């Protein structure tokens, strides 16, 4: 039996976890191909014109999996471990997916206000006719791999912080940061311009890491969104290091970013760090981004 | 500093907010009627990517601040998953960044938080607050009843425009009423006047329902008076979304459970805002054999744009005429009118074929 996972949006919230989990349960996993032009075109065609760009990309990935697997895995992410909510657009993903594709959708609601993540995994295993032991084993391996990745990320972060190049922080959601087609290879482009790009994701969270210089100050806004809180916390952490500039990437029509941007921008401006706000959508061209990045690097006066 | 209160405008309900604060002995500058100018001013200082109602609200505040208001009253942390939660914070930030020095008062939506805040601002006694809230609530019921009457009488009246004239006069009088006795008199007078409207009871009238985001649906200045326009074309408009509906849901949560039960085949979770309600209402109206559905939403509203594919699916399954309109500062009245006119033709055809 083959389980398909669209490699976009919520996949990047837990990269590797789901594929390893399902593989260890004895299923074949089919990831959708890396984002390309065709996928984006397909997604834009079927989706609601006013939904955000990231969602459109997700529908493209979903369509590219149709007919190639027995199930498509679309979880409904509602709240995370800290009982903070995900974007409300994630809540309706499985229902909307059912309208789009004929392949059966495999789904489960992950709401940690109601029940623990582990328990929901057991329920998911039951749907796939796997017993408790098998699920526990698969879960353990997947968690280990996730931890390993986390460690690698942090090691890389400290290496980057040590480097002599000017450091530029990229603030965005993981699904914009790690998808190279969507962010138009912004990391490589910054590298070519002689700067070191640091993803906000790589910054150790002050909750798990001891703060180096100062205590975490209380934030000026309390977000009920998990990414909102996390990004604000990580920003207060990165301010302890010497950084040259900040770029915030946002997908077009992203409702959450409209709120987030206000506070991210204010925080950096207070600390007198140059800030660039880039919006990406299906029409964004590489040349346009290149020009804006070059201009931004020039203003930093290196 | 004596607080001079202002607040966001919301259709005819603005009168209710005004009464509430005036009965508490506070000075109120009620915002001007929303027009293109107010919206343009709001857009200037609002975050670019934010949703449309926030921009309109900011425009409303500005018009009131120019006439002397120094305190803004706005609900915040409304329980829900959408951006409405941050309205208070973001509006406060936008106003202060644009250089307006106002006292921005935010309160939670729970009755207790509202009570404490009102008490703090006005210093009124418990009895006074209770009286003011009672008066305001009675007015709210009256306004909603009038709106419902208008929806019924407009397509049936023999002399065109009679209903609208009466309603307009009543709303104008209602704004200046200060005590309960006069309010009762006005109520009686208005209902008498309405009962004298000559109507054609046997007329075969197509029915259209308005669903969608609560603010755009119930503020006639934002939705280009869709109810009046359709009424004049001879169509009866139904709308379930109003302020009482929202308040009722905030106090009694079980309405949400019934809604969830009914829409389970389409959507198995909340999406924030009134996303679920729109699906529930649409299913209901399809069952009642309506002749058309109009879905109104502010441009890129998170809950409503998420559920739109589901509404479209219901539309395809049932064959009911469906029009979804996103409203924002760039939408012009002429463009919307054309679409309404075309939709009216579709609705009438659908009705005649039945």
Image (cartoon, rainbow, N blue to C red):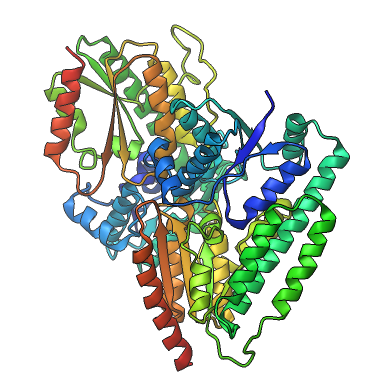
The answer to whether residue A29 is visible is no
Q: Position of residue A265 (x, y in %)?
A: 38, 26
Report how many numbered discs are placed on residues in the image.
0
Quarter-wise, where is residue B197 in the image? Answer: bottom right
Q: Position of residue A271 (x, y in %)?
A: 38, 14
Of the pair A62 and B234, the residue shown nearer to us: B234
- Quadrant for the N terminus of chain A, please: bottom left
Residue sitting at the far top: A213
A288 lies above or below A168: below
Image-based side of B113 in relation to B307, left or right: right
The answer to whether residue A189 is visible is yes
Kindly identify the residue that appears in the image at 49 percent across and 31 percent down.
B95
Q: Position of residue B14 (x, y in %)?
A: 63, 51
B87 lies above or below A154: below
Of the pair B300 and B276, the residue shown nearer to us: B300
- Quadrant for the C terminus of chain A, please: top left
B114 lies above or below B294: above
Kindly identify the residue that appears in the image at 53 percent across and 39 percent down.
B61
Q: Position of residue B135 (x, y in %)?
A: 79, 52
Residue sitting at the far right: B127
B332 lies above or below B79: below
Kindly identify the residue that appears in the image at 60 percent across and 70 percent down.
B165
Image-based side of B71 in relation to B136, left or right: left
Quarter-wise, where is residue A141 in the image? Answer: top left
Of the pair A248 and A153, the residue shown nearer to us: A248
Kindly identify the residue that appears in the image at 52 percent across and 43 percent down.
B60
Image-based side of B135 in relation to B222, left or right: right
Image-based side of B214 in relation to A234, left or right: right
């Amino acid at each position: 039996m083959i389980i398909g996972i669209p490699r976009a949006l919520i996949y990047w919230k837990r990269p590797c976890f789901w594929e390893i989990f399902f593989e260890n349960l004895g299923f074949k996993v089919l990831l959708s191909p890396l984002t390309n032009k065709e996928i984006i075109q397909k997604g834009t065609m079927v989706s609601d014109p006013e939904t955000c760009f990231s969602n459109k990309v997700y529908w493209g990935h979903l369509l590219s999996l149709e007919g190639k697997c027995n199930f498509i895995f679309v979880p409904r992410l509602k709240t995370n471990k800290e009982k903070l909510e995900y974007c409300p657009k994630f809540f309706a993903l499985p229902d909307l997916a059912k309208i789009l594709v004929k392949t059966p959708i495999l789904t489960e609601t992950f709401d940690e206000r109601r029940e623990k993540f582990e328990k929901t995994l057991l329920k998911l295993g039951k749907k796939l006719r796997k017993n408790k032991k098998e699920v526990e084993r698969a879960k353990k391996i997947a968690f280990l791999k996730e931890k390993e990745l986390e460690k690698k990320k942090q090691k890389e972060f400290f290496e980057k912080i040590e480097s002599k190049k000017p450091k530029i922080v990229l603030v965005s959601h993981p699904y914009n940061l790690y998808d190279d087609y969507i962010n138009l290879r912004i990391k490589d482009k910054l590298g070519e311009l002689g700067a070191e790009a640091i993803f906000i994701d790589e910054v150790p969270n002050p909750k798990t890491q001891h703060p180096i210089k100062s205590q975490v100050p209380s934030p000026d806004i309390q977000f009920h969104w998990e990414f909102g809180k996390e990004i604000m916390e990580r920003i207060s952490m990165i301010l302890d290091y010497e950084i040259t500039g900040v770029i915030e990437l946002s997908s077009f029509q992203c409702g959450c970013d409209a709120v987030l941007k206000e506070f991210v921008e204010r925080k950096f401006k207070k600390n007198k760090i140059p800030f660039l706000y880039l919006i990406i959508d299906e029409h964004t061209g590489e040349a346009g981004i290149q020009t804006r990045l070059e201009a931004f690097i020039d203003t930093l006066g290196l | 500093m004596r607080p001079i209160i202002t607040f966001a405008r919301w259709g005819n309900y603005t009168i209710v907010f005004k009464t509430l604060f005036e009965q508490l002995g506070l000075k109120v500058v009620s915002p001007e009627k929303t027009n293109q100018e107010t919206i343009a001013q709001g857009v200037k200082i609002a975050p670019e990517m934010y949703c449309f109602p926030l921009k309109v609200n900011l425009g409303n505040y500005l018009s009131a601040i120019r006439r002397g208001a120094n305190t803004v009253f706005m609900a915040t942390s409304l329980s829900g998953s959408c951006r409405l939660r941050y309205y208070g914070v973001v509006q406060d930030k936008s106003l202060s960044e644009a250089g307006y020095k106002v006292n921005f008062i935010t309160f939670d939506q729970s009755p207790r938080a509202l009570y404490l805040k009102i008490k703090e601002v006005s210093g009124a006694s418990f009895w006074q607050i209770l009286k003011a809230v009672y008066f305001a609530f009675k007015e709210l019921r009256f306004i909603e009843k009038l709106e419902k009457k208008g929806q019924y009488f407009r397509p049936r009246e023999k002399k065109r425009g009679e209903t609208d004239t009466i309603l307009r006069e009543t709303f104008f009088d209602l704004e200046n009423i200060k005590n309960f006795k006069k309010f009762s008199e006005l109520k009686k007078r208005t209902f008498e006047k309405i009962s004298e409207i000559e109507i054609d009871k046997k007329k075969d009238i197509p029915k259209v329902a308005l669903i969608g985001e609560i603010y755009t649906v119930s503020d006639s200045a934002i939705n280009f008076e869709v109810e009046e326009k359709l009424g004049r074309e001879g169509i009866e408009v139904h709308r379930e979304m109003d302020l009482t509906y929202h308040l009722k849901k905030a106090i009694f949560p079980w309405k949400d459970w019934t809604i969830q039960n009914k829409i389970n085949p389409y959507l198995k979770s909340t999406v924030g805002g009134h996303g679920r309600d729109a699906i529930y209402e649409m299913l209901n109206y399809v069952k009642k054999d309506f002749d058309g559905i109009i879905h109104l939403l502010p441009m890129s509203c998170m809950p409503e744009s998420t559920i739109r594919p589901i509404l479209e699916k219901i539309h395809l399954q049932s064959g009911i005429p469906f029009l979804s309109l996103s409203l924002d500062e760039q939408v012009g009245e002429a463009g919307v009118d054309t679409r309404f006119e075309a939709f009216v033709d579709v609705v009438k055809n659908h009705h005649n074929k039945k």
